Amino acid sequence: MDDFTEHERKLLEPYVTNLDRSIFVLTNLPEVVKGALFSRYSRSAKSLRRVLLDEFMLSDELGSKEMFGSQHIGTTSSGKIVQTKKAEEFYDRVLVGYGDDSVAELAGAHIAVEEISIIATKVLEDARIGLSPLEKSTRYVYFDEKKDGKWKYYREPTIMNSEFAALYEETCDLCFQTYTELVPKVSEFIVKREPKDETTSDRAYKASVRAKTCDLLRGLLPAGTLTNMGFFGDGRAYEYLLTRMYGDDLVEMQNIAKEMQGELAKVIPSFVKRANNAHGIATQGFYKRVRNSMEKLAADSALRGTGNDQNEYVRLVEYDKDAERKIIAGALYPYLQKSMREILAIVDKMTDAEKEIVIATYVNERENRRQKPGRGFEHAQYTFDISGNFGAYRDLHRHRMLTQQRQLLTPHLGYKLPKELKEAGPEFETAFVRAMDAAKIAYQKIAAKYPKEAQYVVPLAYNIRWYMSLNLREAYHMLELRSAMQGHIDYRVVAQQMFREIERVHPRLAKGMKFMDMKEYSLERLEAEKRIDKKMDEITKKYGT
């Protein structure tokens, strides 16, 4: 442990959470300084606090001493800008010489991206590593408010400057108007259908009714609906994301990239500047060339077309037939002082009963879904081809530790009217179908000239086709989570069908997935809301009202 003089302790105190323990957190430092500090730390025999003190705060050699002119970096907004700029100068002068892009993973930033389309959120969330997104829910928030007298959806510039502008607005307006008019009517229907019992609080019941109403009606919202997002991510991930967005065909994505880079440059400037410099522009060009060439290739191919499958489905199109052998070997590997070749030979000689014992021991009587099997389960890979509504896709898309790609959102694959709306009466069904039909007609007219931009007018109820390729360990996590009672019925069905397919081909491997919920419910959120009530009571007892 370092011994610091009293003067050194006073200098360090604002920037670390403690001075006398081996685990501590950095505070009051701009992100770019943290990244620079950790990079220097990786090439020094000194402790992090000693590197911060000797090579950043007290040394003139690197020109970094000026960054610490005030006692607390960032104590004022203007002071923080000055210090960040000096940190950027330091980074450019010294760290770039290391040629280590991974340094950018040590600096992070929170950013809000508001009033963007649902289409845009999917492009942003396509980034799987280094970013943690959070999106405004269509389940807990009603999208029934106007701004300046207009419904809140993205008015795509290409469409709005075309002969389709009026058609686009009329169609989106109809979808929003239908959604808004049905909200109170559907809520009333749910209350009559599922009355509150004496064991349920008013708060839990109202929240459950609200969630059910949103679940049934979100399919009316166009993909151009404006929503909000929040991100936390590291510099390297942001740079990659921005580069892809700049190279996107949609004007909205290019505009978002420009605004995001401008804001991120205020806190982690050095880590995002390459997104649109000469190197970034070259990479953007690469993305565009590949995309344009693949689209041309597909257009010239006999495979072009929407196909005949218009129903919702989940199909296991490929799986590892040697999965059990690989998983058992992977499970045993850390516990045997043998090579993988030797362990596989042992597995090959096992009886079915012996194999089953290894698999059962590896999952070892899981007590809840958060107790996940070990990495041996990553040796089994499954690829599913899925057609489901865009609303369900949005929820499943958030699982990033897998490979998935989607096709363009169109009305060609049809939609399914929620059964509750049929039960509620012809008025509800007629209104829903009218909006869906209008959106399909508008899409067909717009897509003839602008196929990518036409996606904005397609409501969330329409199906989209995508594939998911994932290992068994991720399947345990995703399918148990997304089949849970409180989940939306649309993605619960997908998760349940994926489980059945895995169980069909690998019954022993699926046996440990015992927290799958294969039932149907009427008020999916009710039990979850009751649990929230209990937690709120506990907090009240602990802290008072």
Image (cartoon, rainbow, N blue to C red):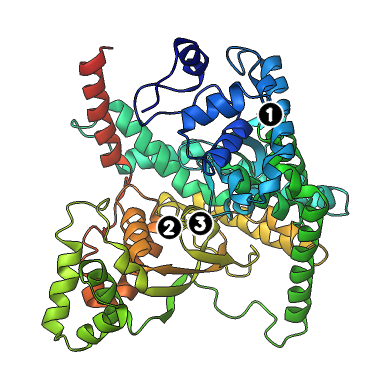
Answer with the quarter of the image where residue 196 lies: top left
In the image, residue 471 lies at what x, y percent?
39, 68
Q: CA distance from mark 2 to mark 1?
A: 61 Å
Q: Residues within 10 Å of mark 2 (few under 14, many from 20)?
A: many
Q: Residues within 10 Å of mark 1 (few under 14, many from 20)?
A: few
Q: Is residue 111 left or right of residue 499?
A: right
In the rendered image, which quarter contains the N terminus? Answer: top left
Asked which secondary structure carries label 2, the reply is: helix
Q: Is residue 24 visible?
A: yes
Q: Which residue is mark 1?
A: 61
Amino acid at dot 3: His
Question: In this view of the protein, which residue sits in the foreground, 18 or 366?
Answer: 18
Asked which secondary structure carries label 1, the reply is: loop
Label 1 close to label 3 by CB (< 8 Å): no
Asked which secondary structure carries label 3, the reply is: loop
In the rendered image, which quarter contains the C terminus? Answer: top left
Residue occupying the point 29% across, 50% down: 485
In the image, residue 297 lies at what x, y percent?
75, 80
Q: Which residue is mark 2?
A: 490
Q: Residues within 10 Å of mark 3 (few under 14, many from 20)?
A: many
Q: CA distance from mark 3 to mark 2?
A: 13 Å
Q: Which residue is mark 3?
A: 397
Which mark is in front, 3 or 2?
A: 3
Q: Is residue 518 left or right of residue 66?
A: left
Q: CA distance from mark 1 to mark 3?
A: 49 Å
In the image, residue 409 lies at what x, y percent?
64, 62
Question: In this view of the protein, which residue sits in the foreground, 160 or 21?
Answer: 21
Label 2 close to label 1 by CB (< 8 Å): no
Residue occupying the point 67% across, 61% down: 440
First along the sequence among labels 2 and 1: 1
Residue occupying the point 72% across, 26% down: 86
